Image: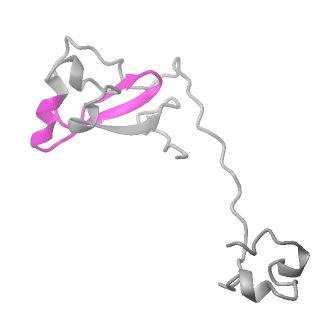
Amino acid sequence: AAFCNAGPRYAPGTGLYSDVAWVWLGSCVGTLAPTAAPTVDLEAPGCPEEYSSAAKYEGGDKVLVGGLVYVCKWDEYGAYCNAGPMFAPGGDNSDLGWIKMGSCRGSLAPVASPL
């Protein structure tokens, strides 16, 4: 590692001493193009209803919170969907009962997050 910034004589692949500072791992083919962040259209028809702490949710129910779609888990963890504000979608413990699906673009099928 001490040789990596030691000048052109240690440059990867071209320097006289490149094999002292670098290990050849192979080459890359292709590129990864950046993807655009999904857009959120909160007025689009077909998005699920906004989450309500007064509502009762079952496995598979979808809600909208801050432009993101969450679905209530189907298994025994779905009980957390109705366990109060500490377990509300988007909260600190929401992953116990809710699955974050992505943003809503006018249909019930959410757009996947780029992250």
When asked about the image quadrant of residue 109, the answer is top left
Q: Is residue 41 above or below residue 28?
A: above
Q: Residue furthest right?
A: 8
Q: Is residue 11 magenta?
A: no
Residue drawn at x 67%, y 73% as measured from the top left? 1
Q: Position of residue 58 (x, y in %)?
A: 16, 31
Q: Position of residue 56 (x, y in %)?
A: 15, 20
Q: Nearer the viewer, residue 16 or 86?
A: 16
When asked about the image quadrant of residue 108, the answer is top left
Left or right placement of residue 32 versus residue 108 in this view: right
Residue drawn at x 55%, y 46% as measured from the top left? 114
Q: Is residue 66 magenta?
A: yes
Q: Nearer the viewer, residue 30 or 19?
A: 19
Q: Nearer the viewer, residue 106 or 55?
A: 55
Q: Position of residue 102 (x, y in %)?
A: 45, 37
- Magenta residue span: 57-80
